[in-house]
Amino acid sequence: MAIGCCLLGALPVVSQPVNLSRNFRPDPLQVTGRTGGEVSLASLAGSVSGCRGFAQGQPNHIINIVESVPMLDMIAFTREVNQDLTMLVKGSNGDLWCGDDQYRNRSPRVSGRFTKGTYQIWIGTAEPKQSVDYVLSISETLHK
């Protein structure tokens, strides 16, 4: 029993779904998580190009957009300076975004119009099986 407990504690964190609509508060909304896994983001995206990195098979976060938002800016960052994060956002409507180093040449960023629907978000690392704590910051304005 104790072994199962300890092994579960080492697994990547999958957060509860978040519902967002226009003018959500707080802005930015920040959620935390932990990377981990050896599944390529390209395979999760159903594409061999454009998405770098590795994550777990299930999304780290699920965002339900209950009312279309003209602009959302998502950035994942870590305080671990030697780690390289990547991001995949997959919408129920078929929209697909990959992020890697767009924000300050270091952190993955995905920005754009998000229509009503469910969005799965994977936060990954450049190398497989890396466990890194991170913050996902979501705002209706571009992060500075």
Image: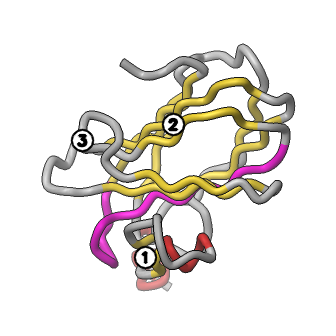
Relative depth, front residue between 15 and 94? 94
Image coordinates of residue 13 in percent, x first then y, are: 51, 59
Relative depth, front residue between 27 and 141? 141
Query: Distance from label 1 to label 2 (Cα)?
Result: 21 Å
Q: Identify which amino acid the numbered label 3 is placed on.
A: Asn
Q: Are marks 1 and 3 in contact (CB under 8 Å)?
A: no
Q: Identify which amino acid the numbered label 2 is placed on.
A: Met
Q: Which label belongs to residue 104?
A: none
Decide if residue 47 is on the left or right side of residue 77.
right
Q: Please name the residue that numbered disc 2 is placed on.
A: 74
Q: Secondary structure at mark 3?
A: loop
Residue 27 located within the stretch drawn in magenta: no
Q: How many C-alpha atoms fall within 10 Å of the one at disc 1: few (<14), some, or many (≥20)?
A: many
The region drawn magenta spans 117-132
Q: Seen from this angle, which residue lies furthest front? A: 49
Image coordinates of residue 127 in percent, x first then y, are: 28, 73
Q: Please name the residue that numbered disc 1 is placed on.
A: 37
Which residue sits at x=41%, y=81%? 38
Q: Report the mark closest to the observer, 1 or 3.
A: 3
Q: How many marks?
A: 3
Query: Distance from label 1 to label 3 (Cα)?
Result: 24 Å
For marks 1 and 2, the one nearer the N-term is: 1
Decide if residue 63 is on the left or right side of residue 68.
left
Which residue sits at x=70%, y=44%? 63
- Res 116 → quadrant: top right
Image coordinates of residue 36 in percent, x first then y, are: 40, 70
Relative depth, front residue between 5 and 136? 136
Q: Please name the residue that numbered disc 3 is placed on.
A: 105
